[in-house]
Image (cartoon, rainbow, N blue to C red):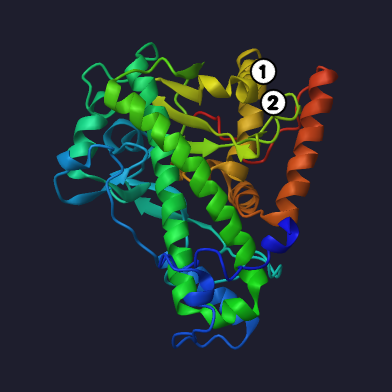
Amino acid sequence: MFILKRFKIFKNEACPCGSGQTYGKCCYDKNDANFDTDHTQKLLLDISKMFDSYKYETCLHPNSDECKPPIKSAHSIQNHGVLSQISYKNHVMGFRTDKTNPFKIMSQDPSTIALRRELDKIGVNDATTHTCFCNYHDSKVFAPIESSPKGFDPTDNEQLFLFAYKAFAFEFYKSRVAFIAMQNLFKNLPAKLKKHPFLFVPEYRGAQLKELEMSYYKQRFDNMLINNEYSDIYTEVIEIPFKIEFATIDCISPRFDITGGKVKQFTKGFMKRMFMTIFPFGDKSYILLSYLKEDSANFNKYVTAIKGTELQRIYEYFSTFLPLYSESIVLNPKLLEKWGKEATLAFTSLSNLIGKDLIQLENQFALNLFKSYHRNSNLEPTKCNLFIEL
């Protein structure tokens, strides 16, 4: 039954369109909207376009009664404190799906829905923005890290919490967007997705589970935010003794640590997550690794291994790790000039790995980490070294 559930929507379960009715009484016998989707690859293309173009405006702050419009395009990586330090002529380089050129299917694997990501020049006012906070809460809640006169203080527990909260909130928003886009997709294409369930059901089941996981984390973060109580979260701060030329903020569940050892990603069937922010401040830079203390059994070993490692190995590790896992990384355009075409292509290629290709690369990376750690040797340098000074 469990395997069948991954590829089948049952008549007696809630309809994936979000109507609240059962599937059998809602979309089971409905016809598609006017989509030209006779060919499977064309259907994949339409699905990808729908996911990319869907927008959702909300304020994630738990005190909705305080919300004051408008919903704004909030920065996951703050503009004035970070983006301004790594921009060139008010632009950074980042990933966004190309809306001008024809869409491209990344893989011929019919169970995978994705578009190729391409590095593009983005204005700092538009970089890493999502419509997930009202103007009032975005300004009020994040003021200690965005407009504090003292700037970043690695000993300030409120600041450390807010960086972790940002990493979570923007991932929660993206997962909500994906889930609502799936519901709208099913409303438009119930017949096609019934005929080709492998295009939809595995992704839908994954999104259902992530909804449960992220809702639990939201409850925990909301409680800390409302009560101004930050003792339930742990943050390790790693200082880099120079200004880096990139920044990222991510909610992650890594498979391997810096020694190549496996990370305990799951507890009772639920994926656990860490919250990572890497950014420059002044003439130094910082890596913040946060997790709920209740998840110590999952991530304490991961963080401890990084904490006890020399900086050069940390640079090599994250230069491969980040393009594989980060969805929010932005870079100084001058860094790409320093890299050259070959290194830039290597970075883009790593960022676009999915499915079996990604797992194969992860396993090879973990093996290299394990060998170099136990042989006390250096990792093979990556072509796209993120930790270089300009």
Quadrant of the image for the N terminus?
Answer: bottom right
Taking 311 as reference, is 65 above or below it?
below
The location of residue 286, given as percent across then percent down, is 46, 22
Q: Nearer the viewer, residue 162 or 230?
A: 230
Asked whether the viewer can see residue 353, the reply is yes
> Residue sitting at 59 percent across and 52 percent down?
348
CA neighbours of label 1 inside 10 A, class few (<14), some (14 to 19), many (20+) = some
Residue contact at pointers 1 and 2, CB within 8 angstroms? yes
Kindly state the secondary structure of the residue where label 2 is placed: loop
Q: Residues within 10 Å of mark 2 (few under 14, many from 20)?
A: many
Task: Give the labeled residue for mark 2.
Answer: 258
Tell me the quarter of the picture where residue 136 sits. top left
Residue 246 pos. (x, y %): 46, 36
In-image side of 90 versus 46 (left or right)? left
User: What number is the disc on residue 63?
Assistant: none
Residue at 64% from the left image edge and 61% from the top image edge: 202
